[in-house]
Image (cartoon, helix red, strand yellow):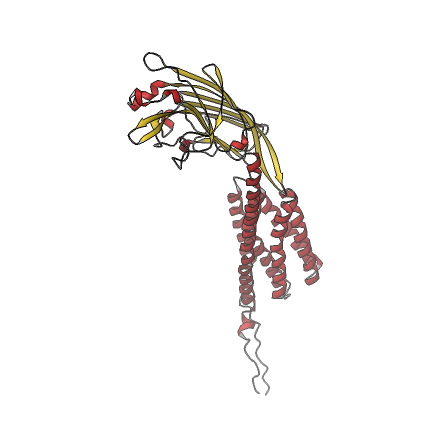
């Protein structure tokens, strides 16, 4: 009797492992469009930032206040230069009134504020320079305030100098001599009082009505500087070089006070020329949106590998459990639907809140995949996969919405997901070989 039995082919013996390897390959291939999606998010963020800059150009940009300080011209062997004299005491109080300006579909956080500045100068701080009194032109002294964007000044700036009201003029002395010093600001000629010993206190009180966008900061020009700000904005960011001495943030807004002494900064009370930059130790507050639309969209794309990988694992396990064959093209169509979710999320979030956009994009994507699964497999399987995808997308939303715990939650979620995959795949026979029966032998 001739034995007609033939051994199973390599593909038949390793069909499950080969299909699993193909699914992994397809997941990796789908990472290519997710990179393109991340670039799309960055492009839209760049467009938003350009719109914000155009808004700031007409309203007033990020404002930095440096001063007031005094500039005094002196004669040197190299020509005329300037002495810079910092105030002994500087106190600033202000209330930021936030609002929102829109250009097309983009908007930017802006504010209005009236800053009340007061303090005094002492000519004793010039003694450390050891200069001849004849070389110093005290009669040409200027009181200077550097301001980033003069478009943000909404009323005539004036100062009460030693009890006398003076009006500021645009421009600052020495502009263009140093790339570090702010060349935008206001100045006014002042008369410096001094006694017989060559020293006296000169006081000032001034108000500045300023508009700006997103951020306001100050330089600690005073030997003792105290800045107090308050606002109804409830998500401030104190991320500059010097932290507030006191701060309080509630749902109703924030209050913050900075107290800076001269030993907390990197420049002295007076110097000649451009040796120091008083802007190097700035501090302030930014009116931020804790997690904006583009940041949330970018976070969502970061978890695309998890969503696509888990979805394909589910279909792969269903395929094995039900002994059904899902065609590679069907896997590809499901993967494309998962990628389109992020395009929907980004486009809708530019027109509505991120939560609404996420719900709409999730319902559309999960509904599409559920209906397709019902047609390819069966209704019961489709309902199960729909429920699991709903759980996945809900968890991902919680993760990307978290400001401080996103990484922690995401790492734990990833760990337990991998643990679940390992649990359900432990009994899969990756070398599924058909049972071999001995051929019948006839006598």
Position of 227 compared to 223: left or right?
right
- Rendered residue at 60%/58% (across/down): 335
Can you see residue 190? yes
Can you see residue 291? no
- Rendered residue at 62%/55% (across/down): 340
- Location of residue 322 in the rendering, given as x and y in whole percent from the top left corner: 64, 63
- Location of residue 11 in the rendering, given as x and y in whole percent from the top left corner: 55, 72
Above or below 63: residue 377: below
Q: Quadrant of the N terminus?
A: bottom right
Q: Quadrant of the C terminus?
A: bottom right
Above or below 108: residue 187: above
Tell me how many marks there are: 0
Above or below 420: residue 355: above
- Location of residue 212 in the rendering, given as x and y in whole percent from the top left corner: 54, 32
- Location of residue 275 in the rendering, given as x and y in whole percent from the top left corner: 34, 32
Which residue is at the front of the view, 76 or 6? 76
Residue 323, by quadrant, is bottom right
Q: Residue furthest top?
A: 196
Which residue is at the front of the view, 379 or 410? 410
Which residue is at the front of the view, 51 or 379? 51
Which residue is at the front of the view, 418 or 204? 204
């Amino acid at each position: 009797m001739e034995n007609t039995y033939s051994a199973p082919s390599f593909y038949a013996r390793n069909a499950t492992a080969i299909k699993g390897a193909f699914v992994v390959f397809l997941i990796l291939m789908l990472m290519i469009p997710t990179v393109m999606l991340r670039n799309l998010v960055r492009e839209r963020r760049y467009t938003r930032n350009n719109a914000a800059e155009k808004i700031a150009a007409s309203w007033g940009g990020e404002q930095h206040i440096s001063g007031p300080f005094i500039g005094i011209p002196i004669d040197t062997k190299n020509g005329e230069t300037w002495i810079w004299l910092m105030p002994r005491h500087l106190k600033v109080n202000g209330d930021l009134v936030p609002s929102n300006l829109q250009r097309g579909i983009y908007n930017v956080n802006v504010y209005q504020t009236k800053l009340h500045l007061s303090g005094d100068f002492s000519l004793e701080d010039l003694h450390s320079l050891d200069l001849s009194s004849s070389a110093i032109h005290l009669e040409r002294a200027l009181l200077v305030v550097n301001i980033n964007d003069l478009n943000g000044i909404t009323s005539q700036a004036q100062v009460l100098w030693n009890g006398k009201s003076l009006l500021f003029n645009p421009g600052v002395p020495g502009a263009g001599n140093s790339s570090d010093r702010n060349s935008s600001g206001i100045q006014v000629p002042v008369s410096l009082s001094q006694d017989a010993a060559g020293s006296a206190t000169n006081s000032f009180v001034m108000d500045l009505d300023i508009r700006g966008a997103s951020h306001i900061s100050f330089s600690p020009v005073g030997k003792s500087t105290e800045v107090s700000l308050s606002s109804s904005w409830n998500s401030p960011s104190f991320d500059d070089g010097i932290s507030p001495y006191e701060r309080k943030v509630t749902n109703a807004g924030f209050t913050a006070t900075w107290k800076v002494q001269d030993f907390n900064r990197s420049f002295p009370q007076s110097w000649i020329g451009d040796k120091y930059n008083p802007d190097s130790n700035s501090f302030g507050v930014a009116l931020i949106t804790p997690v904006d639309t583009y940041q949330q969209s970018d976070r969502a794309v970061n978890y695309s590998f998890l969503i696509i990988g888990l979805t394909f694992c589910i279909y792969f396990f269903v395929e094995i459990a039900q002994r059904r064959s899902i065609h590679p093209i069907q896997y590809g169509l499901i993967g494309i639907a998962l990628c389109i979710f992020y395009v929907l999320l980004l486009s809708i979030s530019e027109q509505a809140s991120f939560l609404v956009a996420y719900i709409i994009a999730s319902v559309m994507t999960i509904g599409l995949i559920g209906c397709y699964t019902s047609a390819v497999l069966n209704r019961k399987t489709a309902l199960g996969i729909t429920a699991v995808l709903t759980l996945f997308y809900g968890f991902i939303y919680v993760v990307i919405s978290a400001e401080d715990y996103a990484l922690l939650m995401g790492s734990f979620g990833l760990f337990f997901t991998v643990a679940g995959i390992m649990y359900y795949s432990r009994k899969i026979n990756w070398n599924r070989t058909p049972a071999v029966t001995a051929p019948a032998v006839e006598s």
